[in-house]
Amino acid sequence: MALPLPPNVSAADFRSALGEFTAAIGAQWVFTTEEDVMLYRDSYSIFWGEAEERIASAAVAPASVEQVQQIVRIANKYKIPLYSISTGRNLTYGGSSPTLRGSVIVDLKRMNKILAVDEKRHFALVEPGVSYFDLYNYIRDNKLKVMLDIPDPGWGSPIGNSLDHGVGYTFGPFRDHFGSHCGMEVVTAEGEIIRTGNGAIPNTDAWQDYHYGAGPTVDGLFAQSNFGIVTKMGFWLMPLPETYLNGKVLVPRYQDFQALVEEVSYLEDSFLIGMPQFGSPAGGALLEPPPPELGPLMQSGWPTQDQIDTYLRTTNKAAWSVTLQFYGPEETVRANWSAAKRRMAKAIPSATFQDGIFFPLPVPPEAEQNLLQPVKTAVGIPSLEIFFITTRNPMTDADPWDGHADFFAFVPRTAKAVHEASRLFYDVYREFGLPTFHNPFFTPVNYYSRSYVVATLVPTWRDPVKNARSRELFGRLVDRCGERGWGSYRTSPAFQERVVSKYSFNNSALLRFQEKLKDGIDPNGILSPGRYGIWPANMRRNRA
Amino acid sequence: MVNRRTLLKLGSVGMAVAVAQAPARAFGSTLLGDSTGLARAVFDERFAEAQAFASVFQSRGMPTTGIRGDVAALWYRDLKARLLERRLPIVGLTDRTALFCLEELARDVGMKVQGRIDHTFDQGGALTHQVTGPSAWTAAGHRLGSQQGFGRVMASLLTDPTLHGESFAAQKHTGPFSAVDRKQLVSWWIA
């Protein structure tokens, strides 16, 4: 497969630009051969091997902010589209491949310094090439009293993940990775360096202590966007809790899901629990095959309430469960679990409770491997185990996937919305004649503390025929959810424009505002053209 | 991604070659045989073939590391720093998911999968080998045969200097979820 040229750039100009990149950062950090550039191919691409696959034209790996500035200035001179990545591991969301085919990847892996971790003021300041593993190992090796909130898998970078609105698994404020950042350094499209928040005050010693600064806050412009290249970022960290405890609530009646949701929301919004993990003993866990007895229930389509009640009586399994997680001193976690049980028992008299595990933090290094998921992630220990868990899911054995494109619909925290979204997903999959794990017992994920996600993983393949079907399915889910008023928090380049198109209030005034900013900030449109639907003026014809 | 791609599906009866017939080379003089010429032989200790693979390297005093699926600790607490300091080949016999993770991670140190042989048991239990690598690997694949015991043969093949002269890229051949069953293994070479 020949590498593409950047769009609207002549071969001669591209050669000149590559020559200037080489002079700026060194020949060994400018990648132009097919073998090297294809390392940035998205392993999960839903366009694999097709003309629309987002293949880069070259890649550059600067080692410093100054080199990033030089690259941006050269790109402006020749109007070369750039696409910056931190570690480029946000698989299912594009990975290391660009939004626009033919872009030059700016791989920030060499900018990998941990600039500060403060265990007294509870923050970190890092460069883009630092991964969660790197930061975790640094904290562990230096016995620092802070805990990371990590994504799963943990091979991404805090900067890249938060700029993509990535999420974690501990306390609400820390699960929102962008929401817990404090201060950033950005190289603009003109090659200028800006610092946000208190960082704009020269010689400040409070950059990671106050995030607003004075005047408008612009940090949000650099997430899921193309207005600058972030080269440093601060994050607020959780003080290392003394202990971790979890306990499970089991709810027999299907109709009591709303009461369960309300109680969990009370505990979550009161900061009494970490991330609640919903489940359904009657419906099976997300990454496990559904119970065999569920098959007959779903055979004739979405079951009635009577059928669901009969099914529950027959199986004698609880309709719902939630695992509650507590962090803090032993006295408080035990007291909070007691309080949660008291409240739950009052709201749902038939609820039963199971004490879970309790252990002090930090987990000794030699004991980490004995900790099972999802607890390992819930106490901030990164791993790559998620790949192996999914591979061993018998549900995919019949026709194994190569990757997946995730669609996460954000819905209100109500039982009605969860059931409605599950039914919507089920109907769309049925329309395509594809198997689905959505059923009346499907449970939400509570990544962001104030909303629920109803999720699906749309398979991707090395087979273009299957990928075409997956793309159509994904697009239908986006459209149907959009009609219902539900968006998706994050999506792969293949669907960013379609997802953004649902945010169309007042004739897409929000997108038009963003385009005005783009035109002013990046008039040559060199930074990540098309990311989240924001095209430079000369490429807006690319709109779907 | 495969270029200058050579694919061969092997497995017909009669191709089995005993370990004793594998090339007997002086490891000290081969590309990988020098203990300073190989960063690591990685094996998944849950699988007998992988253990046999490792035993060949161990018997010759070459560096090996056992994993149990997840390669995170191996990479982030060991290999990454070593390879950034000195880029040397790593070889392995693991499941496909471990290779998937390692090939994604290898980009950070400028290395890529240069060859792989997927060892697949079909539904009838028959073993086949699919070679993706330099042309010399194709012929070498014939030594594997259809019987169990390919782990030791693979170890010998991966230390054969004549197999590594041609530049080749075999990266991103599959995603992490491609295993047709949970016994599927892959031998690989990253440099």
Image (cartoon, coloured by chain):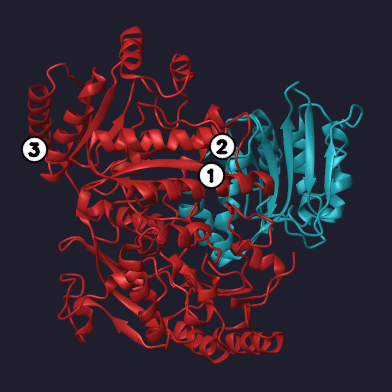
Write down which chain is painted red.
Answer: A
Q: CA distance from mark 3 to mark 1?
A: 47 Å
Q: Is residue A199 above or below residue A458?
A: below
Is A495 or B160 nearer to us in this picture?
A495
Is A4 or A117 nearer to us in this picture?
A4
Name the kind of residue labelled 2 in the image.
Phe
Q: CA distance from mark 3 to mark 2?
A: 50 Å
Residue named by callout 3: A332
Report whether A343 appears left or right of B33. Answer: left
Write down which chain is painted cyan.
Answer: B
What secondary structure is marked by label 2? loop
Rendered location of residue B11, percent (x, y) = 84, 32
The reply to whether label 1 and label 2 mark residues of one chain is yes
Q: CA distance from mark 1 to mark 2?
A: 7 Å
Disc 3 or disc 1, which is closer to the eye? Answer: 1
Residue named by callout 2: A432
Q: Earlier in the sequence, mark 3 or mark 1?
A: 3
